[in-house]
Amino acid sequence: MASATDLVRRFRGKRVLVVGDVMLDSYFEGTAARLCTEGPVPIVKRTSEIRQPGGAGNAAANLAALGAEPRLLGIAGNDTTGAALRSALIERGVSDEWLVQDETAVTLHKLRILADGQYVVRFDEGDTSSQSPGVIQRFMQSLDAAIKGCDAILISDYTFGSISDEFLLRLPALHFERDIPLIVDSKNLVRFSRVSATVVTPNNFEASLLVDPSAPVDTDFARLGRRLLSVIDSEYAAITLAKDGVLLADRDGHCVHLPAHPILRANDVGAGDTFAAALALGLASGANMGVAAEIGIDTAAIAISKPHTSTVEHQELLQRVNLRELASRVDTGDAALVRLLETLELRRMVGERIVFTNGVFDILHAGHVEFLRQAKAQGDLLVVGVNSDRSARQLKGRNRPINSERDRLALVGALDAVDYCLHFDDQTPSHLIRQIRPHVHVKGGDHSGVELPEAEAVREGGGEVVILPLVGNLSTTSMIDRIVSLSFSPEVEAGVVND
């Protein structure tokens, strides 16, 4: 399976159709030194003015920044704000070709005024809900033109009226005919309850409101995910939880919590748009839902560390994902183990087969490499447990290991066949196996015909034990014995043995 880094590299050139409420986000920034004599409000002396695409426009701008080719379908008025919106889109690499102009509409606009970095007020204006039959017809014609050659569909519905009933009636067939991912990000999911979405991305409040409008917000995220999918026709639900990350649920009742990255000073404007855009690109690039959601979280974490309605560049995301993958390959602490277990649960959710094996791996040799390659072939991903220094001494004697646990972890984790590597401190990996719950536990042929002490732990998790035949006659102990014998041989003492 392709790594997250490889998947992000595939973003370039992907075509994503974005349909929804396109708006202009304006920021007037200034300084406030005194209060107005006309009322108890600050006088703000303007220092800068920033205009950026918002709503569906922000999702499209993020797609463009990530290297994709967005096709943005929405409605704008024939007004000054509409002209500014089109300019802002084009400036960020988003074509306005499929933006339908409605002479009677007022372009959606959010104007934020900030003084010394603090919000003073936000003005909202615009209305795109009163669409004439002619506008709807042009919208549907643009839809048919824009969808050609697309790799995914992203709905960005802020309930301002751009999504018509006619579009909703057409959407299920459009999704079925194209057989591409359909991502629905809507403030009113009930309208999309029968569109057969690939994934819906409500926040906690929106999901709770749909499940039971009269009840308080449900804080049992797993229960909420299952209840949501009982009333929405979608393969998955990715419920965004702000600083608490994302709850991912599927129709089989599986749920997994994906934590968010801590941000010192977060700006959450447009975070949902960014998450949905990256999630769509991940799915369009061949990622399973779990990996696509993790990429979405990575992207949103970068976006909220920036001011205003921000976009994330392709290289920024590539660097972050690559660093996360490098860090996750070798597990050195409890927090990292928790993250690994969450990742494995995601992989299990999408049907991947988890393989586990363990050993001291003191002096890595060709036999180890071939054994791990054969172990990986038993499933989709390989997790390797490496004995800590303390447990290695208990198993091998007081003069072992030769290499420290940190070095042994690094060497094993660097092998192509190994997806994740972590150390354990017991003489047997039973406790670790109970946590990981592998589908397959692999051991070498020197354990053939004996009951492994960890076999019961494997069976408890529903897994099986597979014994692989020994590869050659290499062993770490024999290599050490050979080194020792050479060090005391006459040839060495005479200086005739080369390094």
Image: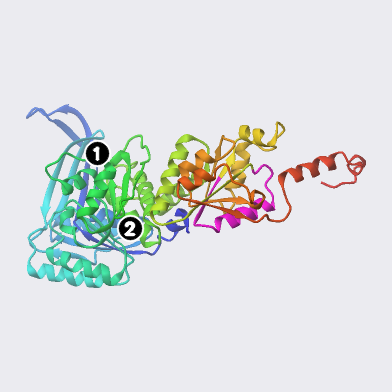
Q: Residue at x 34, y 47 (%)?
A: 300
Horizontal side of 61 relative to 46 (left or right) equals right
Determine which residue is flagged by label 1.
219
In this rendered view, identify the residue nearer to me: 190 or 456. Answer: 456
Q: Does residue 399 belong to the magenta stretch?
A: no
Residue matched to label 2: 280
Can residue 267 be seen? no
Camera-nearest residue between 206 and 442: 442
Is residue 375 found inside the magenta-colored segment of the image? yes
**Helix, strand, or loop for circle 2?**
helix
Q: Is residue 390 visible?
A: yes
Color style of the picture: rainbow
Q: Residues within 10 Å of mark 1 (few under 14, many from 20)?
A: few
Amino acid type at image mark 1: Thr
Which picture quadrant has residue 27? top left
In this rendering, the answer to whether 207 lies above or below 120 is below
Q: Residue, x 31% and y 38% (percent of image)?
A: 266
Instruction: State which region is magenta.
Output: 361-384
